[in-house]
Image (cartoon, coloured by chain):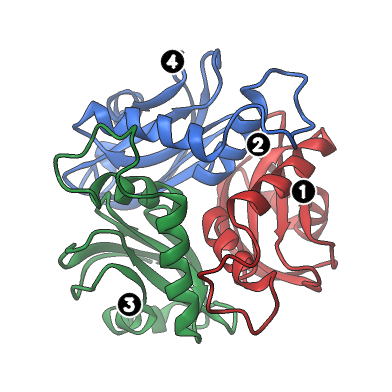
Chain colours: A blue, B green, C red
């Protein structure tokens, strides 16, 4: 079984956000898959996807703070500055975290660990809504 | 052909460890796959998987030292500190390196380069044994 | 449908390079896939693959400058120094960016966003030509 679908995520502020529920609501077809894989691919270069802790909001806050430290705005060597001081750091962060996730599917559910949630990492101040291509392959 | 299996890795100390042999021993079914992909997905948010150099132990040591520098313990802006000073850095490292790998399979073997090995990246001081979901898809 | 193929990329200088065209030219079979996934896997531990902005050359230049800052040469704690000062940073960068990409395929084309291109990240001063294993799975 193959299925590919475009999901438009609701717009979020800069930072790290749990989107597990929004993804699952968009993919009722997952329930029919006994064994398979879900690929999520974000079609942008200034936002990214990752998996991390799904309970404490302070983990998401600390992630944002640390990525801003590790990839600062206004580094003196940036040349790509025309689209704002948040733009070049957003490109770097998106490659550090990556545009896609592969998640195992088992008995109609994502086979995530207890504490794992899917994060949208919004690296722009005003990124708008983001498009994710979901591809389910399984049996 | 689809196969999904839970592998419990033996407990390892904080740092970077080659687990290629342990993974292969757990997946004898790989030998029957002519062309396919193996997905390895770690069900934790404070350990991760990567691929890197499979000979020199000093590469693994330097990786650990550099990640500790790039993602330090006790950064003054961390709020998520209740579970120990190694916890928040572990979450950040796990997203930087990522929870999953996709490795091509060819003629019953992982189609890795000569110098590539699979690493478990253990970011906690006492992480215990880690669970990896292996999904094989191929023909 | 399964297809696996080795692509030898032409040799490139240290830095970030768009290789979307070179990959597509090597994979005419993509045109026959209605729905599927393409996996690209680089068989090296000192070069990596990522997806990022496909227009401005200054994004690629800034990426190189920032990764050199975040993962410097000659860090005093590196022990793995025998193969040159660019070697250990190359290993670290390759794990930060990752050896593989999964890209959705739709109606015979890569389902990338408008501004997304495939990058070869060459982390060595003289890396030579790099081998990528392309695996197409779809229907």
Identify which residue is drawn at 35% across, 81% down: B24
Side of C106 where A33 appears, left or right: left
Residue C19 shows in the view: yes
Q: Nearer the viewer, residue C132 or A4?
A: C132
The label number, if any, that marks residue C20 in the structure image: 1
Q: Secondary structure at mark 4?
A: loop
Tell me which corner region of the image, top left, top right, bottom left or bottom right, holds residue A51: top left
Instruction: Name the chain under label 2.
Output: C
How far apart are the two marked residues, 1 and 2, measured between alpha carbons?
Answer: 11 Å
Tell me which corner region of the image, top left, top right, bottom left or bottom right, holds residue B123: bottom left
Q: Nearer the viewer, mark 4 or mark 3?
A: 4
As drawn, A96 above or below B16 = above
Identify which residue is drawn at 27% across, 40% down: A32
Tell me which corner region of the image, top left, top right, bottom left or bottom right, holds residue C81: bottom right
Return the x and y of residue C96 as percentages of the image width and height: 53, 55
Q: Along the polypeptide, which appears first: circle 1 or circle 2?
A: 1
How far apart are the two marked residues, 2 and 4, measured between alpha carbons?
Answer: 22 Å
Return the x and y of residue C62 as percentages of the image width and height: 74, 40
According to the image, label 2 marks what residue?
Answer: C112
């Amino acid at each position: 079984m193959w299925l590919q679908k475009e999901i438009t995520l609701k717009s979020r502020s800069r930072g790290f956000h749990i989107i597990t529920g929004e993804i699952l609501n968009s993919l009722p077809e997952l329930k029919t898959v006994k064994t398979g894989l879900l690929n999520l691919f974000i079609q942008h270069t200034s936002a990214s996807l990752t998996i991390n802790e799904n309970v404490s909001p302070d983990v998401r806050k600390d992630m944002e703070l640390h990525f801003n430290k590790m990839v600062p705005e206004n580094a003196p060597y940036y040349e790509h500055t025309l689209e704002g001081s948040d733009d070049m750091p957003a490109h770097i962060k998106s490659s550090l975290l990556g545009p896609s996730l592969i998640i195992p599917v088992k008995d109609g559910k994502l086979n995530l660990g207890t504490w794992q949630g899917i994060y949208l990492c919004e690296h722009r101040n005003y990124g708008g809504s983001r498009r994710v291509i979901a591809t389910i392959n399984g049996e």
